[in-house]
Amino acid sequence: MSNFDRNAPVWGAGRAQQTSAVEMDQGLRSFMLGVYNNMSIGLAITGLAAIGISMLAIAGVSPTGKVTALTPLGQALYLSPLKWVVMLAPLAFILFFSFKAESMSSSAARAMFFAFAAVMGVSLSSIFVVYTGESITKVFFITAATFGALSLYGYTTKKSLSAMGSFLIMGLIGLVIASVVNIFLQSSALSFAVSAIGVLVFAGLTAWDTQRLKEMYLYSDMNPEEAAKLSVNGALSLYLNFINMFQMLLSLFGSKQE
């Protein structure tokens, strides 16, 4: 549940003072459209990877939709020690991204983001073994609607959300620690608490990140290459919010196979 570069920017005079209102509005819309386009492509890659791997991993399904058998690939991915590599691979990508982000070109950052999205899809493919396809679809659309509403709020609100940023980051760190602890405790009560609190944390981060990206574009001096890189980094932040919110909601409301 890591996220990328949530530190507040150091702003200069910025576009808001250097361009006309029309140019500023057009530039902002183009920038945010780029963010959402990158994010949407990332989500599509994740979904296709997850579905594709699950089809290769599942060998048998009952008339009720329950998975009854796994292929050798499925057994390796979900039952062998390799599952830990699959689970932790997305985190490794995030750490690498964090260290190399400043030195990457925007095109390299975009390629890395899409590669990360594919790896995340492989990691998420296990949900098709645990939950019913109907509940996965239902929770996905609930997440999409919730995310859209929160991101729109963050983009349009005149109220500054910066004050809740530190609180949300502390909550995110707490969730990561609690999730790691629960790997060993296997507590259903702690798992429920992490999921419930996680939904609220990532809901808040969605609105905050959207406003943060908007203000970074408006109040910082960036050349086109820097703006393109910020677009990719912003897409990654919003993508992670969406994926984590989806997993939390699925844990709370998803119907497990019986």
Image (tube, rainbow, N blue to C red):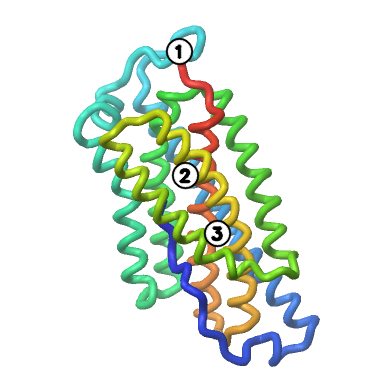
**Numbered disc 2: secondary structure:** helix
Q: Residue at x 53, y 31 (%)?
A: 252
Question: Disc 3 residue type?
Answer: Asn
Placement of 148 over or under 159, stated as above or below? above
- Tell me if label 3 and label 2 are in contact, CB under 8 Å: no
Which sits in the foreground, 205 or 91? 205
Which residue is the site of mark 2?
Answer: 46
Question: Residue 196 location in percent, x, y?
Answer: 52, 39
Circle on res. 258: 1
- Tell me if label 1 and label 3 are in contact, CB under 8 Å: no
Q: Residue at x 29, y 33 (%)?
A: 185
Which sits in the foreground, 74 or 177? 177
Earlier in the chain: of badge 3 and badge 2, it is: 3
**Numbered disc 1: secondary structure:** loop
Placement of 158 over or under 130, stated as above or below? below
Q: Residue at x 59, y 30 (%)?
A: 137
Crowding at mark 1 (Cα within 10 Å: few <14, some 14-19, many 20+): few
Q: CA distance from mark 1 to mark 3?
A: 37 Å
Q: CA distance from mark 1 to mark 2?
A: 26 Å
Circle on res. 52: none
Q: Is residue 164 left or right of residue 114?
A: right
Earlier in the chain: of badge 1 and badge 2, it is: 2
Crowding at mark 2 (Cα within 10 Å: few <14, some 14-19, many 20+): many
Question: Residue 25 location in percent, x, y?
Answer: 75, 76
Quarter holding the C terminus is top left
Question: Disc 1 residue type?
Answer: Glu
Circle on res. 38: 3
Question: Residue 156 location in percent, x, y?
Answer: 74, 65
